[in-house]
Structures are given as structure tokens and as C-alpha cells.
């Protein structure tokens, strides 16, 4: 793409004025000894010197410097920098230096961002490989054992097939969660908001996770009784998934005979905040910034023992952000954790169709 050149005459003008003053002053000094100082000739001499100097300097600068400046712009424009290609270039060196510094700063930020993304990509691929490798090898091991002769033993055959089935279920679980996150990030999975009672939704989630919690003797409860419904405007199915993931997480890392408490509070006029608080093992502060990353685990061995895809909190974050809301986390080791997120509150109670009894 051809670059338009915008010439600058500052350098030539200032240099010419300086040379003219020096030469004219020298000429006047030499003429001081003579009886008649011809001022008209002196002025003409000064003008001639100025014009000659300006022409020579400008031509030389254009040939020696401006061409090189234009080459710099041409080279830089190959990097597709809009700051260089969208405007005519200037032959003023100060402006050029400022633009180059600005360009260099922008490129440095871009390079740093690419390095971070590359590091994230490597971590992500490593995590995906690790998460998929474990259940795959498990399934493969059981199948190979069966093929090597264990299939003849009925009890052993059923046992190994059940374990292989669990490995396949884990693979499906991971793939489904990855697919959900990918769609959320790409904007392909749209939220479908509706008005619903969030208290009722939380209670339903309690009921679904009652057996899982009872195995670890953890109590799922509200912070208080909610006699009246609290209506929110959100995607009911996805918000239930958020609450379910947070509750499952608290059960995983909760102490035996512990408690997970959920509260719903008015934040501002049209917002509520849902808090999920437990008295579990807690999370070190150093881990909090990366907590919502895919596959990030605070305790590698513990989390795998408990199961799960390692994508639960990442899904939670994406769903909440897809609603245009915020999610927060506070935690202290050996004290517990609190996850909270905001939702849009429904001011007016949704209308329900009345059932007419005969």
C-alpha cells in the first residue's frame, strides 16, 4: 500500500535562518570598516543566502533523510499497524520518533499478550491431555485385561466392565463440559432469561444433592427462612447449574459434619446477591486469582479423588458473565469459602395462570 508523504520544512527553515544570520552578520562586520555600508545590498545578500540555503538543505534532507524515513514507514507498515498505514507520514523527526515510540509500546503490549496466551494454550493443552489420559488408560486397562482372559470369569467381567463404564462416563462428562465452555465463549450458547423464584430453585438443588451431601454428613441449608419468594430474571436452567456446581464444590472440599449455607440478599434496587458459604478446608489466597481457569486445581490429588471434570468453576464464571453479572470469591484456609454472584431482580411478581376449579 502506497504511503502518502507529508513534508515538513521546519528543519530546513530553522537551519537556513541560522546560516543566513551567521553569514549576514559576518558580512556586516567585514563591511563596518568601509565608509559606506550599503544596507540594500546587505538585505539582498541575506535573502539570497536564505533562499539558497533553504533550497539546498531541503533538497538534501529530502534525499538523505526523508527517503530513509519513508522506508521506515514502509517497513513498519508491513506489520499492518493502523497507526502508520492509515495516516500520511510526516518528515518531521520529532513526530516520527513519537509515533515510533507509540508503535513500539503497542507492539510490546501485543507481544506480551501473545506470550501470555501461548503460555495459557500450553497449560490448557497439557491439562486436557492429562484429564483425558487418566480415564482413557483406565478404560483401556480393563478392556485389555478382559481380552487377556478375565472375560471368562463372570464376576470379574462384570466388575471390570462397570469400572470401564465409569471411565467412559468421566470422559463424556469432561467432553460435555468442554463443549459447554466453548459455546459460552463463542457466544453460540445464548441465555434464555425468564422470571422465576430463586429460593425455590435453590431448594430443588438441595433436594437433588441431598444424597451426595449426606454421604459426607454435610448439611445444605439456608441462612434463614424465606417466607416469600424472591423472583429473578435469568436463565433458570443455567443458574441451577451454577448453584449445583458451587454446592458440589463445597461438598467436595467440606469437612465431615460441616455445613454449606446459601443466602439471598438485596444488593441494590434491581439486584440480588446469592452467597454460597461453607466451613470447609478453604483456599490459599495465592490460588484465588486462577481459581476460575479451566482444569485449575488447588489440590491435584484431592480433587481427582473426589472426581469431577475440573471445569465446574470455569463454567460457573462463564454462565454468570453471559448474564452480564459478576461472581466473587473469598476464602481462608481452615475457615471456609464463600462464592457469591449477582442476579437481576424481578420487581413485579410474574403472573401465573389461574386454575379454574369446577
Image (cartoon, grey):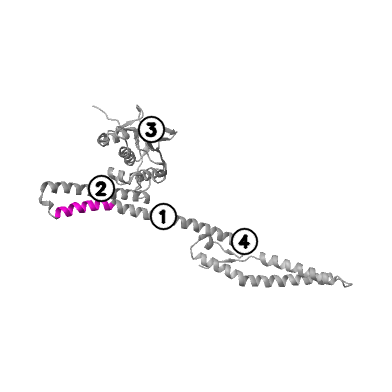
Give the number of the mark in front: 2 or 4.
2
Q: Position of residue 113 (x, y in %)?
A: 45, 55
Within 10 Å of the Cα at label 1, are there few (<14), some (14-19), or many (20+) other Cα atoms?
few
Q: Quadrant of residue 238?
A: top left
Tell me whether circle 2 and circle 1 mark residues in contact (CB < 8 Å). no
Q: CA distance from mark 3 to mark 1?
A: 37 Å
Task: Residue under label 2, please give it.
Answer: 170
Residue interval drawn in magenta = 132-147
Residue 264, numbered label: 3
Q: Secondary structure at mark 4?
A: helix
Residue 236, numbered label: none
Q: Position of residue 167 (x, y in %)?
A: 23, 49
Q: CA distance from mark 4 to mark 1?
A: 35 Å
Residue situated in front as seen by the camera: 300 or 211: 300
For residue 57: magenta? Answer: no
Tell me whether circle 3 and circle 4 mark residues in contact (CB < 8 Å). no
Task: Residue under label 1, please give it.
Answer: 117
Give the number of the mark in front: 3 or 2.
2
Task: Residue under label 4, please give it.
Answer: 94
Q: Residue at x 50, y 59 (%)?
A: 107
Q: CA distance from mark 2 to mark 1?
A: 28 Å
For residue 138: magenta? Answer: yes
Q: CA distance from mark 3 to mark 4?
A: 59 Å
325, above or below 143, in the image: above
Is residue 138 toward the left or the right of residue 278 in the image?
left
Amino acid at each position: 500500500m502506497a504511503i502518502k508523504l507529508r513534508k515538513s520544512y521546519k528543519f530546513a527553515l530553522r537551519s537556513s535562518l541560522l546560516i543566513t544570520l551567521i553569514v549576514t552578520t559576518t558580512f556586516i562586520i567585514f563591511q563596518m570598516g568601509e565608509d559606506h555600508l550599503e544596507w540594500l545590498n546587505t538585505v539582498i545578500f541575506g535573502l539570497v543566502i536564505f533562499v539558497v540555503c533553504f533550497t539546498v538543505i531541503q533538497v538534501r534532507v529530502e534525499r538523505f533523510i526523508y527517503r530513509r524515513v519513508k522506508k521506515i514507514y514502509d517497513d513498519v507498515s508491513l506489520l499492518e499497524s493502523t497507526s502508520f498505514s492509515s495516516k500520511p507520514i510526516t518528515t518531521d523527526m520529532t513526530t516520527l520518533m513519537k509515533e515510533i515510540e507509540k508503535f513500539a509500546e503497542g507492539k510490546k503490549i501485543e507481544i506480551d499478550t501473545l506470550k501470555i496466551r501461548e503460555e495459557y494454550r500450553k497449560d490448557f493443552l497439557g491439562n486436557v491431555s492429562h484429564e483425558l489420559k487418566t480415564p482413557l488408560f483406565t478404560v483401556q486397562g480393563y478392556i485389555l485385561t478382559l481380552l487377556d482372559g478375565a472375560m471368562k470369569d463372570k464376576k470379574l467381567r462384570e466388575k471390570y466392565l462397570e469400572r470401564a463404564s465409569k471411565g467412559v462416563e468421566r470422559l463424556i462428562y469432561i467432553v460435555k463440559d468442554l463443549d459447554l465452555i466453548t459455546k459460552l465463549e463463542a457466544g453460540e450458547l445464548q441465555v434464555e432469561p425468564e422470571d422465576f423464584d430463586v429460593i425455590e430453585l435453590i431448594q430443588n438443588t438441595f433436594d437433588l444433592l441431598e444424597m451426595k451431601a449426606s454421604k459426607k454428613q454435610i448439611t445444605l441449608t439456608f441462612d434463614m427462612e424465606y417466607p416469600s419468594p424472591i423472583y429473578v430474571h435469568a436463565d433458570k436452567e443455567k443458574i441451577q447449574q451454577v448453584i449445583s456446581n458451587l454446592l458440589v464444590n463445597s461438598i467436595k472440599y467440606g469437612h465431615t459434619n460441616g455445613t454449606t449455607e446459601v443466602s439471598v440478599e438485596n444488593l441494590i434496587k434491581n439486584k440480588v446477591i446469592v452467597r454460597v458459604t461453607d466451613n470447609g478446608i478453604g483456599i490459599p489466597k495465592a490460588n484465588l486469582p486462577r481459581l476460575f481457569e479451566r482444569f485449575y486445581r488447588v489440590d491435584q490429588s484431592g480433587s481427582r479423588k473426589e472426581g469431577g471434570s475440573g471445569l465446574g468453576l470455569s463454567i460457573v464464571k462463564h454462565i454468570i458473565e453471559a448474564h452480564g453479572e459478576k461472581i466473587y470469591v473469598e476464602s481462608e484456609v481452615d475457615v471456609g469459602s464463600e462464592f457469591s454472584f449477582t442476579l437481576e431482580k424481578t420487581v413485579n411478581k410474574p403472573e401465573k395462570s389461574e386454575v379454574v376449579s369446577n
